[in-house]
Image (cartoon, coloured by chain):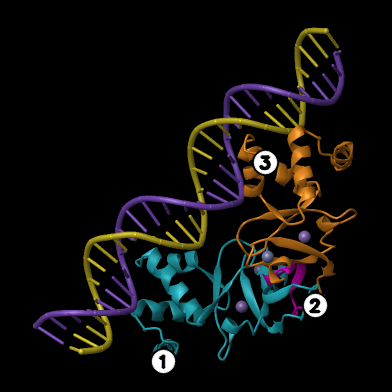
Chain colours: A cyan, B orange, C purple, D yellow
DNA sequence: ATATAAATGCAATGGAAGTGCATTGTTTTA
DNA sequence: TAAAACAATGCACTTCCATTGCATTTATAT
């Protein structure tokens, strides 16, 4: 428990009860989390609080937002030492069309892309859709 | 004009007045088009008609949908001979954070990705965000 | 203890996607 | 050609998620 408090404080986020719970929840799940997931888990808390918690976590580099093509924002805890604010650590994401779960494939970094003249890359998003390991077996 | 009618008929889409106009509009633009773009252009037509036109075009392989990360679906005419229904012709897309325009970089095919055991890829989406050639000059 | 600032809760809004159904227009085919 | 069948369009309405303003509560600083 104290671990999580430390982690939050290190990122300049006050470790409130709700924030600790959400962090713990995300740490236990191995998949990307949507706001509605958190909503359904912590039904006593207000949706806005949960929403703002995710936003705060994102701003402070605790989680990164994932756009998996479902038009539902998902979030996952950043790896220790990840610098996704600096657009490094760009890994790919996999979205399973069967179970609708999205996972970070942090080991799979994005390949470098040579753009045409005049184009300046600042960020990239690569999502693979298909069947995940759990659903394919 | 007759060109467009032929194209639509070849794809088993009836060349109605509205559809021809929308096709023409998209052909003239070199960027991906959102429903609201079409809405703002053809203000007399109903939004649903325009919406369903895009859906029809997509189903019949006349346009492909583009998810550029803005959470607004965009569409672009398929290249002649493109087989995006078969998940081939997977090219990357570039979204300019300055002018908010999205373009197909059809010359840039997606690199092959080796996924971990058990993962089966069916589709992929790669979007580069940054500054486009027009905005960087 | 008081002042200040941050976090939370409540209510409302906005934008975009999607659907049901009636109406209009077009194509078959008898 | 007229009737029947089918496709396209228009209107109204719904759903879903993201986002904001403001009041209230809670925590921190002086
Ligand atoms: Mn990730
Ligand atoms: Mn494209
Ligand atoms: Zn799955
Ligand atoms: Zn631009």
In magenta stretch: residue A122: no
Closer to us: mark 2 or mark 1?
A: 2
- The front one of B16 and D13 is B16
- Which label is found at residue B50? 3
The answer to the question of whether label 3 and label 2 lie on touching residues, with beta carbons closer than 8 A, is no
Q: Chain of mark 3?
A: B
Residue B117 included in the magenta stretch of the image = yes
Disc 1 from disc 3: Cα separation: 53 Å
Q: Which residue is mark 2?
A: A114
Question: Residue A122 at x, y = what percent?
Answer: 66, 77
Give the structural element (helix, strand or loop) at label 3: helix
Q: Is residue B86 above or below residue A120?
A: above
Q: Which residues are magenta?
A: B113-133
Q: Circle 2 — which element?
A: loop
Chain under disc 2: A
Asked if both marks, 1 and 3, belong to the same chain, the answer given is no
Residue A100 x/y as whole percent: 62, 64
Q: Secondary structure at mark 1?
A: helix
Q: Which residue is labeled 1 in the image?
A: A6
Pointer 2 or 1: first along the chain: 1
> Left or right: A4 with respect to C2?
right
At label 1, counting other C-alpha atoms closer than 10 Å, the crowd grade (few under 14, some 14-19, many 20 or more) is some
Chain ID, mark 1: A
């Amino acid at each position: 428990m104290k671990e999580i408090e430390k982690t939050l404080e290190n990122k300049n986020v006050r470790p409130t009860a709700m924030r600790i719970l959400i962090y713990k929840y995300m740490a236990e799940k191995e998949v990307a989390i949507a706001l509605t997931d958190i909503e359904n888990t912590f039904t006593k808390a207000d949706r806005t609080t949960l929403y703002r918690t995710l936003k705060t976590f994102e701003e402070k580099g605790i989680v990164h937002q994932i756009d998996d093509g479902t038009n539902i924002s998902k979030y996952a805890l950043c790896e220790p030492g990840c610098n996704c604010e600096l657009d490094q650590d760009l890994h790919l994401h996999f979205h399973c069309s069967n179970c609708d779960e999205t996972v970070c494939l942090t080991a799979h970094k994005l390949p470098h892309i040579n753009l045409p003249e005049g184009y300046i890359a600042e960020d990239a998003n690569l999502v693979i859709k298909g069947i995940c390991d759990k659903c394919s077996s």
